[in-house]
């Protein structure tokens, strides 16, 4: 496959003198105080890709196409090589980000993933009274917006406009056709909504265009608005989730008319389609980053990029085994990049193990926003790691998957503690040392029975603290 020719944005030029020093030079002490206060409360742009695998960016090893804008973002900040999603499918990972807690602490987090609106109506969703990263930041004076995929409950009972977002534009379900903007049942799934003065409104909309481009433009327009307050923008692209339709693949979309379902969407496309999908995602993110530059906001904006779970059948996995739906590394290890000028050194690579909920905790810490004490975060603040003040330290992280789709049978379970990983999969148990076996090829449970039992016990203790799967 030929490498994708990219319209690469020009390399970011850093200004030597800061705004603060300029103000001091003209004696603007009061203005300096105001600027300093603003800089202590950065804007936040959180970008979440959908089903983008750990190896699907060229800076992470993708050999077949390039992702120059995300590569550049990584070179300007910190790239994590041991970053994990909160779950191996869409809905629970999003729950973990919005709440900063393990998804299995909420009923909606046990939907793995949540079905379409035709299948589940508004029977379950992210509770409207549960504190989220958006509601907490909104209470601190932030403008809040979600652009893109929600997948945490349907109206009239649920929606992002009920969970702290001032405004919303995107698809509510787990997948949307890029040209026709319908869900897997062929039902229209492009919405906009808002919460204003404690009143919510929402509606389905019709708007022509390739969905990745629509989300990019919506994000750029939001960034470009005049405002007095800091903002938090969650940009949740549906790309590169199936159907695998690049920007020139409208024929694929048309061929699915009357044939819309999960299996047909999953079987669509080709490696070339996937390369074009990821390429347009990268181009869009480049436009968003350029908008921050052009608006003079880049220096005071925390930008985080991640994926909601491991890749699908067209992803590049490198040395990893497994994919979306597996608790093998390929199903839960994801690309993650953080850029925060003045805080993150440029071109750093961290081997620190992190998980989705840590990104929530980090954003709250960066914006000086306290979590709700009734619901302690499971994530950890990564700012000391980002600054290089704290060396790599061992983490213990947990996963459980399979109950919603299998009625509680054949559940997968996993725990990573330091370099060790316990895995229950297909009714069999394994112990791996990820320090020298990222591909999970060598089962060491017989050689290290004490470590095996210790991790199994930790997992049992964690499970006792979260919700059990429904038995029916």
Image (spheres, rainbow, N blue to C red):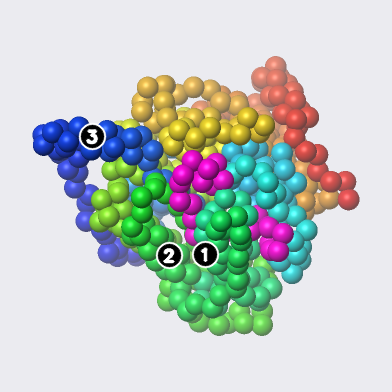
Q: Is residue 10 above or below residue 339?
A: below
Q: Is residue 308 above or below residue 440?
A: below
| Residue in the image at 53% along x and 43% along y | 139
Q: Where residue 194 sits in the image (x, y, percent)?
A: 55, 61
SS of the residue at dot 3? helix
Relative to 401, say whether 10 is above or below.
below
Q: Residue furthest right?
A: 472
Residue 169 image label: 1
**Whole-Å distance between the Cαs marked 3 and 2?**
35 Å
- Per the image, the residue denoted by label 3 is 30
Q: Earlier in the sequence, mark 1 or mark 2?
A: 1
Identify which residue, 147 or 39, lies in the foreground.
Answer: 39
Is 270 situated left or right of 121 in this image?
Answer: left
Segment colored magenta: 134-160
Query: Of 331 and 230, which appears nearest the observer?
Result: 230
Q: Please state if 236 lies on the left or on the right of 157 as rendered.
A: left
Residue 363, above or below 246: above
Which image quadrant is residue 347 in? Answer: top left
Badge 3 vs badge 1, beta-carbon distance below 8 Å: no
Q: Name which residue lies at 37% across and 41% down.
A: 42
Mark 3 or mark 1: whose residue is earlier in sequence:
3
The location of residue 80, given as percent across then percent down, is: 43, 37
- Residue 3 seen in the figure: no
Badge 3: residue crowd in 10 Å (few <14, some 14–19, many ≥20): few
């Amino acid at each position: 496959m030929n490498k994708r020719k990219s319209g690469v944005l020009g390399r970011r030029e850093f200004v030597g003198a800061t705004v603060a020093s300029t103000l001091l030079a003209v004696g603007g002490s009061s203005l300096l105080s105001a600027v300093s206060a603003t800089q202590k409360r950065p804007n936040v742009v959180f970008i979440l890709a959908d089903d983008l695998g750990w190896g699907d960016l060229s800076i992470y090893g993708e050999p077949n196409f390039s992702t120059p804008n995300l590569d550049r973002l990584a070179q300007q900040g910190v790239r994590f090589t041991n970053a994990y999603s909160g779950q191996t499918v869409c809905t629970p990972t999003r729950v973990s980000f919005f709440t900063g807690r393990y998804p299995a602490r909420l009923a909606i987090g046990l939907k793995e993933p949540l079905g379409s609106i035709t299948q589940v109506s508004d029977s379950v969703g992210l509770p409207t009274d549960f504190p989220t990263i958006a509601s907490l930041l909104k209470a601190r004076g932030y403008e809040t917006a979600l652009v893109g995929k929600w997948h945490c409950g349907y109206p009239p009972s649920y929606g992002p406009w009920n969970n702290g977002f001032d405004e919303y534009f995107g698809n509510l379900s787990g997948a949307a056709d890029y040209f026709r903007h319908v869900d897997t049942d062929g039902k229209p799934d492009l919405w906009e909504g808002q919460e204003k003065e404690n009143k919510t409104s929402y509606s389905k909309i019709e708007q022509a265009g390739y969905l990745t481009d629509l989300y990019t433009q919506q994000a750029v327009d939001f960034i470009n608005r005049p405002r007095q307050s800091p903002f938090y923008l969650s940009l949740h692209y549906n790309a590169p989730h199936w159907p695998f339709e690049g920007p020139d693949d409208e024929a694929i979309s048309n061929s699915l008319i009357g044939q819309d379902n999960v299996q047909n969407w999953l079987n669509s496309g080709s490696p070339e389609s996937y390369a074009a999908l990821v390429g347009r995602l990268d181009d869009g993110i480049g436009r968003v980053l350029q908008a921050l530059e052009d608006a003079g906001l880049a220096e005071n904006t925390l930008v985080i990029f991640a994926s909601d779970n491991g890749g699908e059948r067209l992803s590049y996995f490198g040395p990893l085994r497994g994919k979306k739906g597996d608790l093998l590394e390929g199903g839960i290890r994801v690309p993650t990049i953080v850029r925060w000028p003045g805080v993150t050194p440029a071109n750093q690579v961290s081997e620190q193990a992190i998980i989705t909920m840590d990104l929530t905790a980090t954003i709250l810490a960066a914006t000086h926003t306290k979590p709700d004490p009734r619901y302690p975060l499971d994530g950890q603040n990564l700012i000391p790691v980002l600054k290089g003040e704290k060396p790599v330290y061992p983490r213990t992280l947990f996963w459980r998957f399979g109950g919603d789709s299998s009625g509680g049978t054949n559940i997968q379970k996993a725990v990573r503690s330091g370099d060790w990983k316990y895995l229950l999969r297909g009714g069999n148990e394994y112990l791996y040392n990820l320090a020298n076996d990222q591909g999970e090829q060598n089962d060491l449970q017989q050689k290290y029975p004490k470590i095996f039992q210790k991790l199994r016990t930790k997992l049992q203790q964690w499970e006792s603290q979260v919700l059990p799967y429904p038995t029916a």
